[in-house]
Image: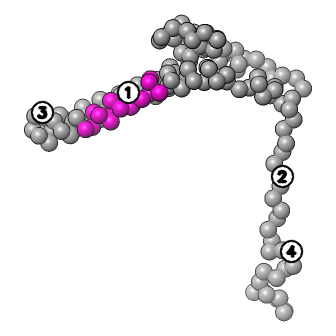
Amino acid sequence: MAGKGQTRGSSGSGGGIAPTPKPPTRSPSAGGTRSQRVIPSAVANRMARRIAIATGVPTVLGMATFVASYLLVSRSILDIPPAVTLLTSGGFFLLGVLGLSYGVLSASWEDSAGSLLGLEQIGVNVGRLRGAFKRPPAAS
């Protein structure tokens, strides 16, 4: 119900759309300098390599479980209950999720690459992770 001589949308305010606010700018001192917040490329490459292997292999095995189960059941080689297929593939996918954490926590943050499996680095990196959450925020 527009009033006398007024039509909808002609309020003269530019269509009723408010100007978009500008995003807040962060000062360079907030959170440290950029070089302190960036993971070194050598460490990032180590993490990526470990994550790719530790998540990729179980994920491929989880998908292969469905294919192998289908082939075995459809060709009447073996009668596999669907629950076994589901639990087996689910176990492989869960192992892939755990592999993600393993890949991040087992990578050495030192200049040297560390051992092949990186098991000795897990305790060190978990300690660093806990220390990061226990530290009070830096004063400005």
Distance CA(mark 3)–CA(mark 2): 64 Å
**The residue stretch that appears in magenta:** 52-67
Q: First in sequence: mark 1 or mark 4?
A: 4
Residue at label 1? 58
**Element on which disc 4 rests:** loop
Say which quadrant the C terminus sits in: top right
Residue at label 4? 13
- In the displayed structure, 34 sits above or below 1; it is above
- Crowding around mark 3 (Cα neighbors within 10 Å: few <14, some 14 to 19, many 20+) is few
**Element on which disc 1 rests:** helix
Distance CA(mark 3)–CA(mark 4): 74 Å
Residue at label 2? 22
Judge whether residue 105 is colored magenta.
no
- Crowding around mark 1 (Cα neighbors within 10 Å: few <14, some 14 to 19, many 20+) is many
| Amino acid type of the residue that numbered disc 3 sits on in the rendered structure | Leu
Q: Can residue 31 be seen?
A: yes
Residue at label 3? 78
